[in-house]
Amino acid sequence: MIFYRVSKKMMISAGEASGELYGALLSREVKRLWPDTEIFGIGGPRMKNEGVTLIAPISQVVGIVEAVKHTGEVRDTFRKAKEALVTKRPDVLVLIDYPDFNIALAKRAKAAGIPILYYVSPQVWAWRRGRVKTIALLADRIAVLFPFECEYYKETGLPCEFVGHPVAETINITQTKEELKKDLGLAPDRDVVTLLPGSRPAEIKRHQAIIKGTAEKFHHEFPGVQVVVPLTAESNLPEGLPDYVKVIRARTTEAVACSEAAAVASGTVTFETALTGTPMVVFYRVSPVTYFLAKLLVKVEFISLVNILSGKRVVLELLQEKASPDRIFAEMKRILHDMPYRNDMISDLGKIKALMSGKKPSQRIARMAGEMAGW
């Protein structure tokens, strides 16, 4: 008698850079638990490095106006994703955030009878709360990154579990600040400040003048302070930076961890910065139209995860015209020299880190997906 080996198949749809990291960490854990699993889907280089076969790349789009310009690209990606559901027939589909795209994909998977695990809830607490009911009708289970998110799914009957934030898994700093500086090619006996413009090309382009202006102010008033701009391996600043600014690639966590203060473009990296305990100011700019529409649609007091999780203003948020070199520099000076203010902020950041204590999200998600797939 001949026995044919049936391979395990998982499809992951991670539409953006942060979700792609979570998809890479999940893929690594799945391969550890079930080495013969074929994983395919929408992702980027980190997922590919973990053995995922990419059917389409992640989006680098942020903002309503920007998204309109890329509708053709999104449509093509969706077509490829639909085809993969049919031709490859995964045992389980893992959807990571990216709600409009992934909810549409979930409808196709649901119709095909493919189990669906939604990993990372859309920000239903900020806008379009009706998506809770839609997701509950489509997904079999949902895993959320923050404890308060489960409340939104409580009345739907959809099994919801707080698994923790996967970014916490990536932070394992054991070196001192001096050791980190030396490792990054910085002077170990001089203070460091980091300026983070974001990861997407459009973000970097919008924020470059802010970064450059803030760096100039530090160089003029505190020439002994080392100014660092962390970028991803693929990112570039279109206009370049002065020689006194140190650009460090693919080492954002280490750069932030050895800093005395940081200016951070709003996004997941604010949460990562919080986990290192580095005090910060958060800034962001989008197109005027995107900002106007967001003000109408989004009903939240804060935009940064640090403040949302804390339920109060822990870090200053500077948006649109308020995100100026003058105001960012003034806030960073306060962080550096107002010790009670600085220490209170560090204490509040420590409470955020405590929320993730004992959580192993990638391992938990892998096991959840395996259970749903019947492995």
Image (spheres, rainbow, N blue to C red):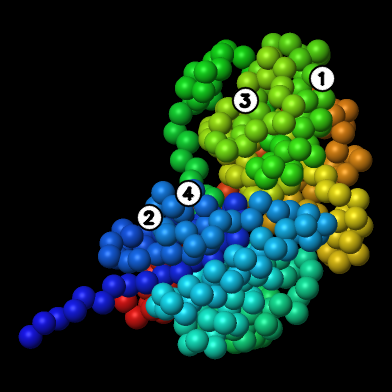
Q: Nearer the viewer, mark 3 or mark 2?
A: 2
Which element carries disc 2, helix, strand or loop? loop
Residue under pointer 4: 46
Quarter of the image where the N terminus is located: bottom left
Q: Where does the image place residue 187, in percent across and percent down from the top left?
A: 56, 13
Which label is found at residue 247?
Answer: 3
Q: Which of 333 and 142 lies nearest the eye of the viewer?
A: 142
Which element carries disc 1, helix, strand or loop? helix
Dot 4 or dot 2, earlier in sequence: 4
Dot 3 or dot 1, earlier in sequence: 1
The answer to whether the residue labelled 3 contacts the one labelled 4, judged by CB atoms less than 8 Å apart, is: no
Dot 1 or dot 2, earlier in sequence: 2
Dot 1 or dot 4, earlier in sequence: 4
User: Horizontal placement of 213 versus 254: left or right?
Assistant: right
Alpha carbon separation for disc pair 3 and 2: 30 Å
Type of amino acid at the residue the image marks with label 4: Arg
Dot 3 or dot 2, earlier in sequence: 2
Q: Where does the image place residue 169, in percent across and percent down from the top left?
A: 47, 50
Q: What's the residue at 39%, 52% (across, down)?
A: 50
